Amino acid sequence: MLRILYDCTGTKSLVEIVEETRVQVTLLDEIITRADWTSHDYNVHFSLGLLNDGNSELEISIEVDGGQYRSLPDFRPNLYVSEYPDRDFTSFEGDARTDLAKKYAVRLTLAAGKRIYLANTVVRSLPALLKEFDFISSKSDVEKRVIGKTNRGNDLTGYIYGNRNLPTILVTSGFHPPEPDTLATQAIMKWLSGTLSAHVLESFCVAVVPLVNPDGYELGNQGANAAGINLYWHFAIERPRLCPEAW
């Protein structure tokens, strides 16, 4: 018997088993932001978890946003899988198609007793990221500083490298939880912790805020904070209570 797992990390989606081995996924809508004379639609990501708790192997078909395998072009999407929701996701090697927009169709085999977490982006959990950034910062002489609070009261943490009296370079990531730009921030922090960065820190202070939108990670949002504001595009400085992260 196929079951939906509700401990899935990442973007929240509506997942339904409409037949024994046929799964439909509906992308949840967030407000589309208008900025720079255009619209920014972040409702393009999904993640889901499935468990085969039966005694035999299952051939499963997954339809995202109404995607039908036979009607989709033969474009293979980049998909990612994990056996556990809070561990690293790796590339999915199975059969899948996409219209290069929001529709996907996936075919996979799930052995008896096995589970799978599937997403169309590299899923990164908030607890794992917080642990990783603290671990990297512990390897060097860096000031860890709470620079503010989020809409939900989470800490906004900055890691400050070098002399704060020097001109400052600000590095940010984690505005949109499904986007794995935090991988780049990890690499930057590791570089700043090593000897190769000494010539830069002689002239500059570097402040790194790796998770600008931790509330979005907690809630499984696509691009918005807890108040529904996409603060990458809309700083909402006129509403600091709704968007304290930007403030």
Image: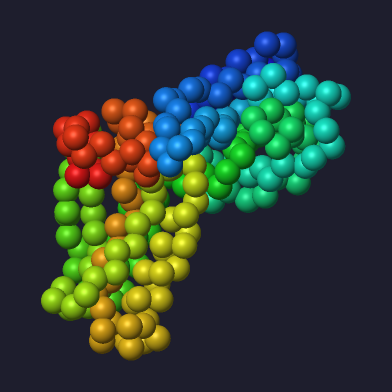
Q: How many marks?
A: 0
Q: Residue furthest front?
A: 37
Nearest to the observer: residue 239 or residue 133:
239
Would you say residue 60 is visible in this rendering? no
Identify the residue at image location x=35%, y=57%: 172
Identify the residue at image location x=69%, y=19%: 66
Answer left or right for 69 relative to 83: right
Would you say residue 195 is visible in this rendering? yes
x, y percentage for residue 217?
38, 39
Identify the residue at image location x=49%, y=46%: 179
Nearest to the observer: residue 99 or residue 57:
99
Q: Residue furthest left?
A: 165
Q: Residue 33 sits in which quadrant?
A: top left
x, y percentage for residue 161?
25, 73
Nearest to the observer: residue 130 or residue 75:
75
Q: Residue 74 sits in which quadrant?
A: top right
x, y percentage for residue 136?
35, 67
Q: Residue 164 sits in which quadrant?
A: bottom left
Task: Point out the image quarter for the C terminus.
Answer: top left
Answer left or right for 190 relative to 12: left
Above or below, 28 against 11 in this view is above
Identify the residue at image location x=43%, y=41%: 36
Above or below, 123 against 8 in this view is below
Task: Point out the image quarter for the N terminus.
Answer: top right
x, y percentage for residue 193?
34, 77
Above or below, 98 against 181 in this view is above
Answer left or right for 82 relative to 32: right
Here the colouring is rainbow
Answer left or right for 214 relative to 20: left
Q: Residue furthest top?
A: 18
